[in-house]
């Protein structure tokens, strides 16, 4: 060994001895600790960038190692359960679902919180357990027109005049119902409050509103002047003879009829509520009246085929008797007897609808369901007897995510022209991944980016050139619109290959079979279903190609104010009629 190398070795040994503990077990401990830290860092670098972090949770549900689609599905489900409760003190409460006020989830932002882990942080041992991967608050944005419509309406409900104190009897004593202060809040104030609120995911967020309150003009202290008048009314003993029975309202009952109001001069006046008296008389009528019968009308496929008339009943003439009660309670005589008069009651009418396994039965059922349950429906059998049925199918309504079918159609057209390729970059990924996000996870950013790139007017012209109606439009304000007939036409063209064919058709069909939102038509059908759902505000839609064991059909069901359960129920009944 050369002299230089010997000197260098001795210098290294000298440095090692100076900086390392003298005892062997201590040196071993240091090296083991260093090894563990290296293993931890290596583990952190190996954690997939597209999966949920170890502590990733949404509303208490673990999403460790969850995929993008799985996280999106959980977030959408939790968003659907999220609501807000607006309170004005203890006097007024307004509860509403977030989806009904124009809110939409920033799904991809929340997913990034669940999986975001920068490379520099991975160099810090244990940092994987310190990442802010828990989503407790819902990240949302608002569609302005829908949001403003809600806040305008809510502001009117949460703005109310002051209510003066009222008299009543409790435990045999005259007491007062305390006054309620007025409330005033504007639509703009509600928008600011909701936009800045932390909204609990999957739960109800209670917001105490800073409404402007003003005290009532008359409180319990101002009731002394009318107390004597109330005492005089309560001192009356009234007997009501109805048939062969007698009834006497108690003091507590009479007190509930007394109403205080503020006159034009600001004074408190006492009146007797005739409608509340009628409620009391209804309890008497239950004992002495004869209920009317029920007329049963049988409807088959929309036509009356039978009728059984119900019996005529009799009831107290509450209009006349309540007016007499008001009159005697105002008189100085403390005792009075009134005789109830009776009037005939016509029977109620019940319609019993049945639907035969025929095209007429299918059409009658679709008509009744559409108008009775606020739905828009279009059905076309593609083989067999080739029945058709539709109701409200040409009405244009917010499309929800079903508009993404039209975006996909124009995207494929540009691919065929060589203008776009699957590997092209877009947002934080490429066209291939973005397409799955749009059609499987059903998130919005990729679809909105393509709409911006293609142009809304160009999209309209493109789909009209393919035979769709003007009821489908990307230029309708806060939400794209479509019709049940257009969605059914799209799915027919997709199935037959007249609208799409080749690899593009196969790719879209794969998405329509693979998405997680299969609670509507797929749940209700006995066949294999390729479908696209749409949910926005209170709208819930489903359009599908159904390959039933006994035939193939296309069906679109669009709803407002419902859920996927009614869609599944309608699907079961449709298949019972078409394939008995």
Image: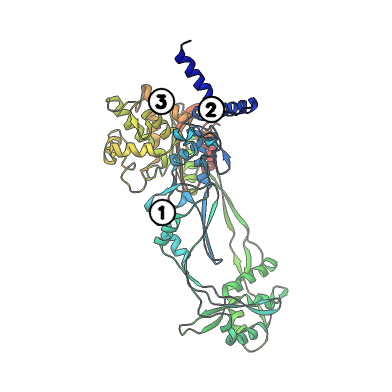
What separation in Å lies between label 1 and label 3 (alpha carbons)? 36 Å
For label 1, the residue is 147
Q: Position of residue 66 (x, y in %)?
A: 53, 33
In the drawing, does residue 359 fall left or right of residue 278?
A: left
For label 2, the residue is 38
Q: Residue at x 58, y 87 (%)?
A: 225
Q: Position of residue 169 (x, y in %)?
A: 66, 77
What separation in Å lies between label 2 and label 3 (alpha carbons)? 43 Å
Q: Quadrant of residue 59?
A: top right
In the drawing, does residue 85 fall left or right of residue 185?
A: right
Q: What kind of element bears circle 3?
A: helix
Q: Position of residue 183 (x, y in %)?
A: 48, 69
Q: Position of residue 168 (x, y in %)?
A: 63, 77
Q: Is residue 384 above or below residue 521?
A: above
Q: Is residue 338 above or below residue 369?
A: below
Q: Which of the two discs, 2 and 3, sits closer to the camera? A: 2
Q: Residue furthest bottom?
A: 332
Marking on residue 507: 3
Q: Residues within 10 Å of mark 3 (few under 14, many from 20)?
A: few
């Amino acid at each position: 060994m050369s002299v230089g190398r010997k000197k260098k070795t001795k210098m290294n040994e000298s440095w090692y001895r100076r900086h390392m503990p003298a005892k062997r077990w201590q040196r071993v401990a240091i090296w083991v600790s260093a090894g563990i830290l290296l293993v931890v860092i290596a583990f952190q670098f190996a954690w997939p960038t597209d999966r949920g972090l170890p502590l990733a949770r949404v509303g208490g549900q673990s999403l460790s190692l969850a995929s993008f689609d799985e996280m999106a599905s959980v977030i959408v489900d939790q968003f659907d359960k999220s609501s807000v409760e607006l309170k004005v003190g203890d006097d007024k409460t307004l509860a509403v679902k977030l989806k009904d006020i124009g809110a939409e989830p920033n799904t991809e932002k929340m997913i990034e919180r669940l999986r975001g882990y920068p490379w520099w942080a991975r160099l810090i041992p244990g940092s994987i357990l310190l990442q802010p991967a828990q989503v407790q608050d819902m990240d949302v944005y608002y569609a302005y027109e829908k949001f403003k419509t809600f806040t305008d309406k809510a502001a009117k409900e949460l703005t109310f005049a002051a209510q003066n104190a009222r008299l009543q009897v409790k435990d045999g004593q005259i007491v007062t119902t305390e006054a309620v202060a007025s409330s005033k809040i504007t639509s703009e104030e509600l928008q600011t409050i909701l936009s800045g609120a932390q909204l609990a995911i999957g739960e109800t967020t209670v917001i105490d509103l800073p409404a402007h309150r003003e005290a009532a003009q008359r409180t319990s202290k101002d009731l002394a002047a009318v107390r004597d008048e109330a005492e005089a009314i309560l001192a009356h003993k009234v007997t009501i003879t109805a048939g062969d029975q007698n009834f006497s309202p108690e003091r507590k009952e009479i007190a509930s009829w007394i109403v205080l109001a503020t006159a034009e001069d600001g004074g408190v006046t006492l009146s007797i509520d005739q409608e509340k008296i009628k409620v009391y008389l209804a309890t008497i009528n239950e004992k002495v009246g004869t209920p009317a019968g029920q007329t049963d009308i049988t409807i088959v496929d929309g036509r009356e085929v039978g009728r059984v008339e119900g019996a005529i009943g009799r009831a107290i003439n509450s209009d006349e008797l309540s007016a007499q009660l008001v009159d005697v309670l105002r008189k100085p005589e403390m005792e009075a007897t009134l005789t109830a008069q009776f009037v005939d009651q016509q029977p109620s009418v019940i319609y019993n609808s049945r639907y035969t396994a025929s095209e007429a039965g299918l059409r009658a059922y679709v008509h009744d369901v559409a108008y009775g349950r606020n739905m828009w429906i279009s059905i076309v059998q593609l083989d067999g007897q080739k029945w058709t049925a539709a109701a409200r199918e040409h009405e244009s309504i917010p499309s929800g995510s079903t508009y993404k079918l039209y975006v996909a159609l124009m995207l494929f057209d540009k691919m065929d022209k060589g203008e776009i390729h699957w590997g092209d970059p877009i947002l934080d990924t490429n066209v291939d991944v973005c397409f799955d996000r749009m059609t499987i996870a059903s998130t919005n950013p990729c679809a909105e980016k393509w709409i911006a790139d293609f142009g809304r007017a160009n999209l309209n012209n493109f789909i009209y050139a393919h035979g769709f109606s003007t009821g489908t439009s990307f230029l309708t304000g806060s939400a794209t619109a479509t019709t049940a007939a257009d969605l059914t036409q799209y799915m027919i063209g997709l199935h037959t290959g007249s609208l799409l064919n080749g690899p593009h058709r196969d790719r879209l069909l794969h998405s329509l079979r693979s998405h997680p939102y299969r609670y509507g038509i797929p749940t209700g059908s006995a066949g294999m279903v390729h479908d696209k759902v749409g949910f926005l505000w209170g709208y819930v839609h489903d359009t599908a190609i159904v390959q039933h064991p006994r035939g193939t059909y296309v069906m679109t069901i669009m709803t407002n104010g419902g859920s996927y359960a009614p869609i599944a129920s309608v699907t079961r009944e449709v298949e019972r009629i078409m394939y008995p």
